[in-house]
Amino acid sequence: RRIYLVHGSRDWMFPAALARAARDELIRAGAEVRYREIADLAHAYPREENARILGWFDASLRLPGEPA
């Protein structure tokens, strides 16, 4: 399974340490995980991450210059 996990370091509802623990457990279970922790993000959806998410799941959707 491929999982793209984005979490805000300032999330007041679910601490970033919990997201990191989830990432580690998913990797141990055999998932292919891309983890991104956004420094100034609280408990919100980061719309600016959409292009990276799409590119992660389907390379044909990656924007020019966007990292793999």
Image: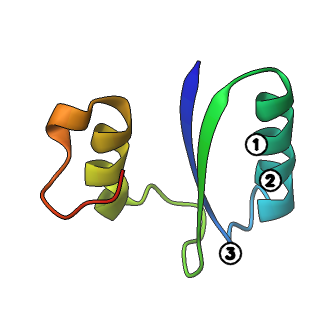
Q: Which mark is residue 40?
A: none
Residue in front for this viewpoint, 19 or 59: 59
Identify the residue at image location x=87%, y=47%: 21
The residue identified by callout 3 is 10
Q: Tell me how far mark 3 sits from mark 1, CA to CA.
A: 17 Å
Observer-side mark, 2 or 3, equals 2
Q: CA distance from mark 2 to mark 1?
A: 5 Å
Instruction: State left or right for residue 37 relative to residue 65.
Output: right
Whether 5 is drawn above or below 3: the answer is: below
> Left or right: 52 with respect to 12?
left
Q: Is 40 placed above or below 59 here?
A: below
Q: Residues within 10 Å of mark 1 (few under 14, many from 20)?
A: many
User: What amino acid does circle 2 point to?
Assistant: Arg
Tell me residue 22's x, y (percent).
81, 40
Q: Which residue is mark 1?
A: 23
Residue type at mark 3: give it: Arg
Q: Position of residue 7 (x, y in %)?
A: 61, 58
Q: Residue furthest left?
A: 64
* Residue type beneath disc 1: Arg
- Dividing the picture into quadrants, the one containing residue 29 is top right
Residue 28 spot, x, y in % from top left: 86, 29
- SS at mark 3 in the image: loop
Q: Secondary structure at mark 2?
A: helix
Question: Which residue bears the numbered disc 2?
Answer: 20
Sequence order check, earlier mark of 3 and 1: 3
Query: How far across and how far down the image is residue 44, in percent?
Result: 50, 60
Q: In the image, is 30 to the left or to the right of 39?
A: right
